[in-house]
Amino acid sequence: MIELLAVVVIIGILAAILIPVSGMIRHKANQSICASNMRQLGTASKLYTNEHGGKLISTPYIQSGYWFQQLYHYLDVKQRASGTSKVFTCPEDEEAIKELASGNSEWARLSYLLLKENQEWSRINEIDDPARSPAFIDADQPATNDYKSEARFISKVKGADGWRHGAGVNVCYWDGSVRYIENPTYAEVFYLNE
């Protein structure tokens, strides 16, 4: 009887250890998927810039659409096709995942915010150091256009509560690289590209 109790206690202890660890592993895997999505956005953005004579994707709505619609061609995404826009969705963004699964409007599927209010005429050579200048951020308040600028977005961020990946955030830079910044400052995320 004592042996059986000992086995039950050991199983309980192991379960108490393994359950939180498996949750942490899942969150880290989702952080990696998010970084991969952002890397694809960065690559698509570079392709767009190269094909358009150095012009950056535009924040305001232009004839070819909002910033994310300007990238569809480079991501092989069909406009308004249900289930094809996972690249625009962080797996930790539960609200966007629900919208994606329901097939509702693509507007709610965005998990990422395009930084720098680029006008239609903005060019890559205007950015001093693309490798240190944030282009996209994994955002709790994503935006389709320039209405939601960083000033409006940052009001929603209250320290680590505003980031999906623990105490940090994935950031894609204008050179296409993606980095995880732990405990980022406002300037690290928004103003390196000024």
Image (cartoon, rainbow, N blue to C red):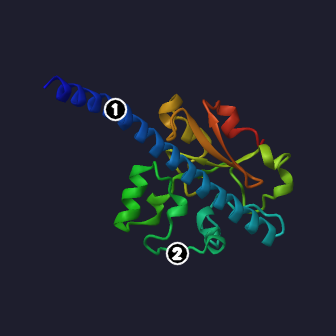
Q: Horizontally, is 37 left or right of 6 in the view?
A: right
Using the image, tell me which numbered label, if any, was put on residue 79. 2
> Alpha-carbon neighbours of circle 1 within 10 Å: few (<14), some, or many (≥20)?
few
Quarter occupied by the C terminus: top right
Residue 120 location (% of width, % of height): 73, 62
> Alpha-carbon neighbours of circle 2 within 10 Å: few (<14), some, or many (≥20)?
few
Q: Which is more N-terminal, label 1 or label 2?
A: 1
Residue 154 location (% of width, % of height): 56, 37
Q: Horizontally, is 9 left or right of 72 in the view?
A: left
Using the image, tell me which numbered label, if any, was put on residue 14. 1
Residue at 66% in and 48% down = 115
Q: Is residue 156 visible?
A: no
Q: Horizontally, is 132 left or right of 136 in the view?
A: right
Q: Amino acid at mark 1?
A: Leu
Quarter occupied by the N terminus: top left
Residue at 45% in and 46% down = 26
Marks 2 and 1, how far apart at CA: 48 Å
- Depicted 164 relative to depicted 73: above or below: above
> Please, what secondary structure does the residue beneath circle 1 have?
helix
- Depicted 86 relative to depicted 33: above or below: below
> Please, what secondary structure does the residue beneath circle 2 have?
loop
Q: Is residue 154 visible?
A: yes
The mark closer to the camera, 2 or 1, is 1
Residue 18 location (% of width, % of height): 38, 36
